[in-house]
Amino acid sequence: MNYRKFDNLDFAFSALGFGCMRFPLVEGSDSQVDVNEAVKMLRYGIDGGINYIDTAYIYHRGDSEAIVGKALKDGYRQKVKITTKFPSFSAQEEGDFDKFLDEQLKRLDTDHIDFYLMHSLDRSLWENVILKFDCLTKAEKAKKAGKIGHIGFSFHDELDAFYTIANGYDKWEICLIQLNYLNETYQQGLEGYKLLEEKGIPAVIMEPLLGGKLANLPDRALDIFKKVNPNRSPVEWAFDYLWDKPGIATAISGMSSLEQVKQNLEYANRASSGMLNDAEKAAINAVRDEMLKIKTVPCTACNYCMPCPHGVDIPRNFEIYNSLATFENDFRSKVQYSALKRDSYEKSANNCIKCGVCEPLCPQRIKITDNLEVAKLTLDAN
């Protein structure tokens, strides 16, 4: 495993971090985690060198933190750093910061959280929750009391908001951002990453595979990579793009199977800063250009929008629609949508009544109801 040290922290990050938002589910369930398998995967990853675990209050409908706590029994807690997040979007009053933090410590069954992030910040949450409720002062008090080790934030908004938040507090110690080779100008993009690098703030990366989109490339994009290195998988290309950058502490992967853990550990063992040559960088740029020609919905299946009050499986509909767009009239996508309507009509885009409950919850700022209408019309037509 490659490890990365930063001057502001007495800690070396494993190049690969374990994201705890996409644990495997019990067969036949759309929400119940297979806890035994999740614990097995986490421990396998830690035994393989992963030392950074990322979870949050809302992941897996509130179950993720407790699963992490269970996995870190038997000496595993001492091998890792835990990151979880203050659910800023759920805060209603000043006392909520301490209330949530204490609940999270109990869920994780630990006496301290190593990295505590202000979750999913945008300009509104920054102004109306973090500043209004004096959350940073409360975080500093919790740090002094030993409840948390380091203070940071995760981000979902435009670049100007990123500058406001990153420059609005001089004690940030870590930052979680979305970045991959397809999203260089999305949200804070590369420019925001460079600001963190200038400030010496370690950048932790979420969505390195864009919800799996970069793991399943169309042939015309895949052929570009194969010409440069026929043995490197699309997943490894996506990780290498990030690991090449010196200011990136770790890339968080939301792994859903033991096989994914094994494969990603193998890739991480080859990771190093400055690992890409000019031909490889040119190939990534060419694949980006090819992929950006495809008009898809930028859904990462994070499930923040779920559950829909009317039963629509929003991420699943976008997954099917994106597959149809990416792989050009993919027959499987048509069959999958027909089966969704036939077996669980309420889960299909046809059942959306445009209530709009989902849209404020989406970290990608997707116009969900409009895009569900497009998906419905497109998939029905095919």
Image (cartoon, rainbow, N blue to C red):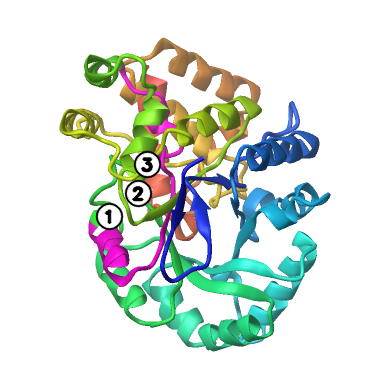
Quadrant of the rendered structure where residue 32 is? top right
Instruction: Residue 265: name its quadrant.
Output: top right
**Residue that carries the numbered disc 2 in the rendered image:** 179
Which SS class for mark 2? loop
Image marks 2 and 1: residues in contact by CB distance under 8 Å = yes
Q: Which residue occupies 20% across, 34% down?
A: 281
Residue picked out by circle 3: 272
Report the span colored magenta: 191-218
Find residue 253 and report its horizontal and vertical position in percent. Answer: 51, 41
Residue sticking out furthest to the right = 74
Q: In the picture, which quadrant includes the C terminus?
A: top left
Query: Looking at the picture, which amino acid does disc 2 mark?
Result: Leu
> In this rendering, is residue 40 above or below 113?
above
C-alpha distance separating marks 1 and 3:
21 Å
Q: What distance separates the C-alpha of mark 3 from that of mark 2?
A: 18 Å
Name the residue that disc number 1 marks: 189
In the rendered structure, the answer to whether residue 334 lies left or right of residue 283 reads: right
User: Whole-percent x and y of residue 298?
Assistant: 36, 42
Q: Residue at x 50, y 14 (%)?
A: 335
Q: Residue at x 57, y 18 (%)?
A: 339
Tag in front: 1 or 3: 3
Figure check: 100 above or below 135: above
Q: Is residue 275 magenta?
A: no
Q: Is residue 82 left or right of residue 176?
A: right
Which element type, helix, strand or loop, lies under badge 3? Answer: loop
Residue drawn 35% across and 26% down?
A: 378
Amino acid marked by disc 3: Ser
Q: Earlier in the sequence, mark 2 or mark 1?
A: 2
Q: Is residue 164 left or right of residue 154?
A: left
